């Protein structure tokens, strides 16, 4: 059974969501506690699956790429789990999210700024998805704010 998340856990998560490179010592100083307590809490957060991953958020524009989000609505009789397993293998898809609401799946694609190449990538992705009822394409021009918590 997962340990209960407490106030210090939330404060740790908020600090790390702003700067995942903070050391245990720096976190302890910011939170007025010991490095050992931070270490124990971090281990529990990781073991309990609260912290899934430490990562970098790149500036795709500066790297010469474009970030596109596909909102996909799939017909009810199609097995989404099978689709997800197939899409996980696609190198252009960086995030796959199951969703409720307007779309069943939300796919984040990183591709070249060349629109003809990007069109080919989007077409190849959508060909892998049987039973598409509706597809929305959104081009991300700038991440203005990104906070995990």
Image (spheres, rainbow, N blue to C red):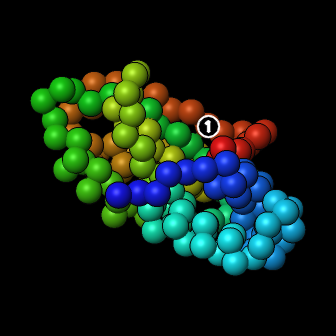
> Which is nearer the eye, 40 or 124?
40
Q: Residue furthest top?
A: 102
Across and down, in percent, residue 23 comes to 77, 75
> Which is nearer the eye, 86 or 18?
18
Across and down, in percent, residue 4 comes to 50, 51
Residue that appears at 40% across and 22% down: 101
- Quarter of the picture containing the N terminus is bottom left
Count of numbered tags:
1
> In the shown orientation, is residue 77 left or right of residue 50?
left
> Which is nearer the eye, 37 or 125?
37
Q: Quadrant of residue 22?
A: bottom right
Residue that appears at 46% across and 28% down: 136
Does residue 64 show up? no
Q: Quadrant of residue 112?
A: bottom right
- Quarter of the picture containing the C terminus is top right
Q: Secondary structure at mark 1?
A: strand
Q: Is residue 82 above or below residue 101?
A: below
Q: Which residue is mark 1?
A: 139
Does residue 124 show up? yes
């Amino acid at each position: 059974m997962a340990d209960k998340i407490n106030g210090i856990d939330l404060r740790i998560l908020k600090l790390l969501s702003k700067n995942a490179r903070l050391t245990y010592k720096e976190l302890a100083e910011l939170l007025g506690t010991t490095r050992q307590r931070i270490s124990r809490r971090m281990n529990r957060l990781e073991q309990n699956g609260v912290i899934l991953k430490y990562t970098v958020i790149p500036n795709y524009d500066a790297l010469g790429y474009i970030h596109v989000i596909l909102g996909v609505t799939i017909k009810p009789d199609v097995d989404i789990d099978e689709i997800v397993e197939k899409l996980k293998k696609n190198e252009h898809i960086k995030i796959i999210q199951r969703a409720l609401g307007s779309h069943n799946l939300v796919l984040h694609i990183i591709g070249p700024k060349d629109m003809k190449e990007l069109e080919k990538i989007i077409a190849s992705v959508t060909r892998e998805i049987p039973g598409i009822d509706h597809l929305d394409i959104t081009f991300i021009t700038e991440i203005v704010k990104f906070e995990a918590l």
